[in-house]
Image: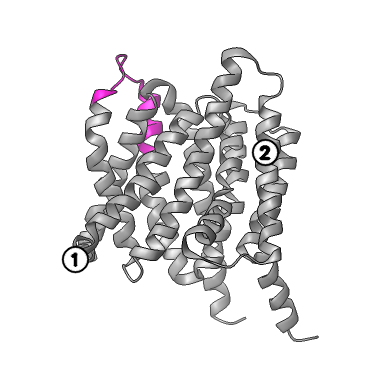
Amino acid sequence: MTAAAPKSSALYAQLVLLAAIWGGSFLFMRMGGGEFGPVALAGLRVIGAGLLLWPLLMLRGQTRHVWPHAGHILVVGLLNSALPFLCYAYATRHITAGASAIFNASTPLWSAVIAWLWLGDRLGRTRVLGLALGFGGVVALAGSRASGASGSALSELLLAVLACLAATMMYGVAANYAKRHLAGVPSMAVAAGSNAFAGLLMVGPTIWFWPAQPPSAGAWVAMALLALVCTGVAYVLYYHLIQNLGPSNASSVTFLVPLFAALWGWVVLSEPVTLDMIAAGSVIFAGTALVMGLAERLLARRRAAPLL
């Protein structure tokens, strides 16, 4: 066995760890959102992540990469952290952790559509098929969640689904905005700078919308884990994987996050894993795989592999 094999195994183990951490973010939003409220929870999450990441950036001596691009990094902070975190903090009050994470898995679909509309990226037949499958799965899951609900419960559920989709669309815009305006800027500088700037912007709203009833110790623990581990530590781990596994392999974490989100929701909150989640999630994952070109890359590797 070559020396590269253990290293590769360790990196893929870290990929699974990252999926488990990001899957936990939906659980912690469920646990803390009811007491903090969406605005305060999102604000504390991005403030805490910024307070963790900025000193790490200083230790690396990379803060100099932030200031020449401060305006663009601020936009990424709004579109990739503050506003999506707010959307999910609202959504997870009304739908399960697993369902929220499945909707989140549609992010690559939005990225592809926005890249086509904005940057002129080509959409071949395979990617178009993937988009049709992926968005079809999103519609199917939303419709399934809405069936049987009525009145205010239906309105809250539909708003929660729209909040999830708005968050994923903003993630897609942020990815393409960074591609266009922040190419060549170290990823860690973008991650730390965007969260730090977004955190500064969220100080005022967090104070204004601070809950009248003091949150419990459990809610504070959930918030701290959400900010420091699921956001701050997760960003560091993700960019480490990008550097060592490559962007395409690192992005495969998209398929694992909903599995862990559903698992944590089931274990901790007794949230059911329903047939509609499994079916719609499978369709969304298949569409996302086609859009990301994973199927084509796997086929190419098989063709290149030597015959035994």
Residue 28 included in the magenta stretch of the image: no
Q: Secondary structure at mark 2?
A: helix
Q: Residue at the location (74% across, 77% down)?
A: 302
In the picture of the structure, the residue carrying the numbered disc 2 is 139
Magenta residues (range):
208-225
Q: Can you give x and y, in whole percent of width and height, for residue 144 in the image?
A: 71, 30
Residue 217 included in the magenta stretch of the image: yes
Using the numbered discs, state the Cα–Cα distance from disc 2 to disc 1 in whole angstroms: 44 Å
Q: Is residue 52 left or right of residue 21?
A: left
Contact between labelled residues 1 and 2, with CB atoms less than 8 Å apart: no
Badge 1, how many Cα within 10 Å: few under 14, some, many 20+? Answer: few
Q: Return the residue nearer the eye: 234 or 277.
A: 277
Which amino acid type corresponds to the residue marked 2 in the rendered image? Val
**Pointer 2 or 1: first along the chain:** 1
In the picture of the structure, the residue carrying the numbered disc 1 is 64
Q: Can you give x and y, in whole percent of width and height, for residue 258 in the image?
A: 60, 44
Q: Return the residue nearer the eye: 55 or 147.
A: 147
Q: Can you give x and y, in whole percent of width and height, for residue 26 in the image?
A: 50, 37
Q: Nearer the viewer, mark 2 or mark 1?
A: 2
> Can residue 10 be seen?
no
Q: Residue at the location (48% across, 52% down)?
A: 172
Q: Return the residue nearer the eye: 87 or 45.
A: 87
The answer to whether residue 140 is above or below residue 219 is below
Badge 2, how many Cα within 10 Å: few under 14, some, many 20+? Answer: some
Which amino acid type corresponds to the residue marked 1 in the rendered image? Arg
Q: Can you give x and y, in whole percent of width and height, for residue 197 in the image?
A: 24, 48
Q: Residue at the location (43% across, 22% down)?
A: 34
Q: Is residue 144 left or right of residue 191?
A: right
